[in-house]
Image: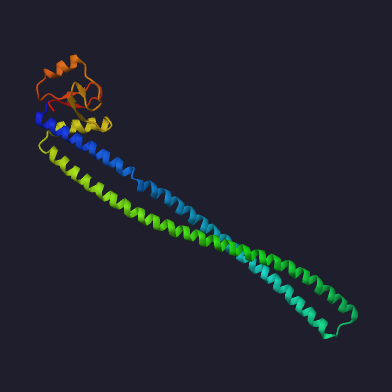
Amino acid sequence: MKASSHDQRQILEVARLDQATTALNHKVSTLAEIALLQSVTTKSHNARDLRIGAQTELSDVKRELLRAEADVEQIVSRITKDESRLSGGSASPKELEQLQHEVGTLGVRRAELEEIELEIMMRVDEINARITELQGQEATYAAEIADLEIRKENAMAGFNNELEAIVKERQESLNGVSPEFIALYEKLRSNNNGTGAAALIAGACNGCHLSINTVELKRIAELADDEVVRCEECRCILVRGV
């Protein structure tokens, strides 16, 4: 293939701009804010899941507390009824003895149930405290995420401005260049890790940075200026005279 010296120099400039684009895209993908956002978002989701789990647990424990309170109320009601009969004086001595025994037994049972009720209430308090702590963590993470999003957007805006300028300069550099030559460059770039053209400097390809043997250098030197030269190693377009 043939291409004018001007077109070859323009393609080399395009290659430089493409390398700059690759470098910028790498900076974007490795922004510290992106990694931090992923980390904080994961922590936020974990706190949310734990809080939802705690709220579900709280609902179950509250139902358990209601049952315990009902059991205590039932015992208290029976004790009150028996004590009323005892103080009424209408029962026989045997009935009074039975009532006194039942009141004593119910009193023991009441103490046991109230202990259970107290333990459940303590569990409710502990779960509520855990939920409050997790909600605080979620709020903290939400604030961190909002701050990181702003920082990321500010950084991205700067990169986007640079990328837009590069795209504009690339389009201008390609104006007037042979479509066939552009197509060759794009094909080589896609097949060669982004390197489609490089300068021939001091007997070496500036793309793969490998030296070219003397015989090949002599052959290249004898070619016409509009002859498109390719690196034997990386196959990119070698631009001479730069």
- Determine whether, in the image, residue 223 is placed left or right of residue 56: left
Asked if residue 76 is positioned above or below residue 183 in the image, the reply reads below
The residue positioned 18% from the left and 33% from the top of the image is 183
The residue positioned 34% from the left and 42% from the top of the image is 30
| x and y, in percent, of residue 118 in the image | 67, 66
Which color mode does the image show? rainbow
Q: Residue furthest top?
A: 215
Position of the C terminus by quadrant = top left
Position of the N terminus by quadrant = top left
- Determine whether, in the image, residue 177 is placed left or right of residue 115: left
- Determine whether, in the image, residue 77 is placed left or right of residue 5: right
| x and y, in percent, of residue 71 in the image | 70, 70
The residue positioned 13% from the left and 41% from the top of the image is 172
Q: Is residue 183 visible?
A: yes
The residue positioned 30% from the left and 42% from the top of the image is 27
| x and y, in percent, of residue 197 in the image | 20, 30
Looking at the rendered structure, the number of numbered marks drawn on it comes to 0
- Determine whether, in the image, residue 141 is placed left or right of residue 174: right
> Which one is nearer the viewer's eye here, 195 or 176?
195
| x and y, in percent, of residue 3 in the image | 11, 28
Q: Quadrant of residue 237?
A: top left
Q: Is residue 4 visible?
A: no
Q: Residue furthest right?
A: 93
